[in-house]
Image (cartoon, rainbow, N blue to C red):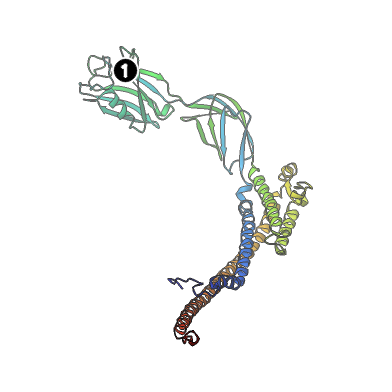
Amino acid sequence: MAGEFYISGISGTGFDYQSYLAKYQELKMIPVNMLQADQTRLMAKQQALSSIREKLDAFTDPLSSLLLDSTFDTKKAVLSNSDVASVSVTNDALETSYSLQVNQLAQANTFKIGTVNTITDINSQITTSGTLTINYLKDGSASSLSIDYTNKSLKEVMDQINQSSDLQASIINLGTSSSPDYQLIVTSKNSGLDNRITGIDDSVNPGDDSAGVFSEDTAKTFETVAAQDAQIVLNGISFSSSTNTFENIITGVSITVKDTGTTTISIERDNSQIKKNLESIVKAYNDLLGTVNSATGKGKPLSGEGSLNTMVSSIFRIISDGLGKFGLLDTVGDAETTKGYLKINEDALNEFLNRSDAKEIIQKFSDTLDSYISTYSDNLSRMNQRYDNNIRDLSERMEFLTDRINKEIEVMRLRFARLEVYLSEMQSLQLRIQNFASGLQMPDTNANE
């Protein structure tokens, strides 16, 4: 009992009841230990079952993908010269070929804006009052950006330009480190002729640089990079674009040019996802087979669970009937560790995918296997739930028995303690009686004679 303190042996009888109770408790706990062993075995079974369920779940994603029509409609672009362009396609693209010639890449327009007087410090305030206006096109429509440069530094003018969604600016030094000459470089953020810069104006400058801050003299302010559209010839037809991307000229095809030159573009069916999914299914089967063999072997947690081996055999039959009969499967080898393992025959699969009924065959196989996997996953869930229930029941039984044994031991310990106290008291009483009796002994009469 909590709070009690016991000492055995005070009676001098030589009986150590604490050791006796420890041994007695050990014997009483044997059924509890047996239940603990049963629970440990069940938990090992449950852990092994969880590993099998994990391998079974690996079938889900590839099977779901193969059941989608879009997986079989995927297209890809194959280029003879990928340095010239890159191409993205959608499932709407037609399977055909094109010849592409890239004559020119798109460029963004750049201007250098000179100054009326040399600016030697980008952080010095401009004392002249006035406005710098940059005129430009935005997708073909006239637009402008005006900046009041009064009491601003050249750097602040640059920063304000960079807040624009259409223009960006930087500062260059056309002088030397000891005698700098700072000027603005302004570039359109969008390429093409429809986004070019059309003019630079200083509100104070009459045009002859006799006043103002920013020069309108074409010798100081001028175009450094001309705006230009990308130009291509596709199957003999010319096209231009303000960017390097051409969309909507071919259904389902987007072309991004990267360099001048020529290339062919072949739009083909993309079977890579189909192959990847089938390889994933075969890998999932091999992983499942290995896990089940490991868990159900002699002395293993799920030894004797024949339903698991039946499950693997059923999956093998479905895969064999759906793929193997078309020559799409090979065995991995005869080694014991890989016995029964499968792999995809890539050459046979490539040829098979050219069949007009390949999609129908693969989807029928996928549907059959998906239905079986789903059903057996439910069975494993029920098995796992039974293990959960049994483990919980064993915990409750062990807790009940342990509590009952502990209470019994405490009662016995208290009784032994009281008995030992009683015996000790009896021994003390016996000693007092003996001492008293010794004091009452008669005198020896012979000694007087």
Q: Is residue 253 left or right of residue 5?
A: right
Between 113 and 441, the residue placed more toward the observer is 441
Question: Residue 83, position in %: x, y?
Answer: 58, 27
Instruction: State the residue position of label 1.
Output: 182
Q: Closest to the observer: 3 or 373?
A: 3
Residue drawn at x 69%, y 59% as measured from the top left: 300
The picture places residue 447, in percent across and down from the top left corner, at: 49, 84
**In the image shown, does 10 or 70 lie closer to the viewer?**
10
Is residue 360 visible to the viewer in this orientation of the structure?
no
- Against 68, residue 441 (above or below) is below
Q: Is residue 9 visible to us here?
A: yes
Q: Please identify the quarter of the rendering in which residue 207 is found.
A: top left
Position of 56 relative to 204 (above/below): below
Q: Is residue 229 left or right of residue 268?
A: left
Q: Secondary structure at mark 1?
A: strand
Residue 84: image x %, image y %? 57, 27
Q: Residues within 10 Å of mark 1 (few under 14, many from 20)?
A: many
Total labels drawn: 1
Residue 421, x across and y down, in percent:
47, 78
